[in-house]
Amino acid sequence: MTTQQMDQAKAEAFAGQMVGMLNNGMLSLMTSVGHRTGLFDKMAAMPPATSQQIAEATGLNERYVREWLGAMVTGGVIEFDPAAKTYRLPAEHAVSLTRASGPNNMATFAQFVSLFGNVEDQLVQSFRKGGGVPYSEFGTFQQLMAEMSAQVVDATLTDVTLPLVPGLVDRLKAGIDVLDVGCGQGHAINVMARAFPNSRFTGYDFSQEGIRAGQTEAKAWGLSNASLQLKDVAKIDETAAYDLITAFDAIHDQAAPTQVLKNISNALRPDGVFLMVDIAASSNLEDNMQHPLAPMMYSVSTAHCMTVSLALSGEGLGTMWGEQLARSKLNEAGFNDIDIKSVEGDIMNAYYICKKD
């Protein structure tokens, strides 16, 4: 295409889009730093302050704090008073950046930028040669997911998520057997076990680190009805053992999701319920054009969810496998009664309530 044939206005608009993307990409990295160092949390409770005062309040190096503040100010995150040389985190911004905001803290997600950057070389090799990047290469991923999951679990699990299933809370109070598939660090299991002492809770995950962390928490909480076990969920061979099985954003990561769903179906009792919380999206790209998190979720899929599955010669569903494919696989596993619900304020997840008949 020659310059004469090119739509110059379109080219200039896209160049501007690229400048914004580069700025925001680096700003995401600095947002992660602000989250991890506690700068946002501390500044949210401070009046306008100098870089020295902020450094003293956080116990951080002033020179680094000052340069970081430069990124935050020019990026429109933090306000700056040139005359007083003071910085302020507006309350309207703090609600999206601090731990006090629970699941609304989007600074947590910014940590993915540096995490996935660490595996970029291996990811590029996978583009060229196929295969994938194994789970073991993702360093702090387990801790990051545990942090993000805990924000949601603590805020919504017992009061919002479980009541989505008619009659479930009463059954949990009376006493049933529950399994959480891909439980990670087991926080959801422990929260449910503490809330419903008459029920019995089991969690399976193939991460030794995650299981150990969950066991430590269960012991600290004095739970006798929570059991966290190291197990590949693709090898579950139990039959009619549970009244409720849950999977919180875990199925799309599996190397063998089709087999995992069949195992879950087999492990449920006839009147059991499978509660699957997974990404709210369509299986069709064209239907996701207005999804507010689509670019991020497809990127996360490329850099983690899909590639981890392919590293195990798996199906490589990816994060955005979507409702249509999810329904198909659930049907194949024997779930013929599927009700999909949403929770106000949660644009990330869909809540699948699945029964066998």
Image: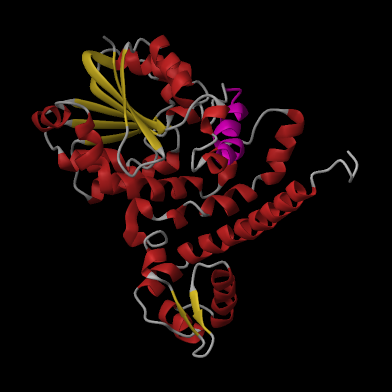
Residue 181 visible, this angle: no
Residue 322 visible, this angle: yes
Percent x, y of residue 340: 33, 25
Percent x, y of residue 144: 46, 50
Which quadrant of the structure image shows residue 230?
A: top left
Percent x, y of residue 115: 57, 50
User: Which residues lie in the magenta part?
Assistant: 298-314
Q: Looking at the figure, which quarter contains the N terminus?
A: top right
Looking at the image, residue 293 sits to the left or right of residue 126; the answer is left
- Looking at the image, the residue that sits furthest to the left is 174
Instruction: Give the answer, above or below, for where 350 lies relative to 221.
Output: above
Q: Residue at x 59, y 54 (%)?
A: 114
**Of helix, strand and loop, which mostly describes the magenta segment?**
helix
Q: Residue at x 39, y 11 (%)?
A: 331
Q: Give 1 or 258, whichever is nearer the viewer.
A: 1
Q: Residue at x 56, y 64 (%)?
A: 30
Instruction: Give the answer, above or below, for where 211 lies relative to 260.
Output: below
Instruction: Give the answer, above or below, for where 217 lies relative to 101.
Output: above
Q: Is residue 101 magenta?
A: no
Which quadrant of the structure image shows residue 226?
A: top left
Q: Which scheme is used to colour this image of the protein?
A: secondary structure
Which quadrant of the structure image shows residue 43?
A: bottom left
Instruction: Give the answer, above or below, for where 112 lies relative to 343.
Output: below
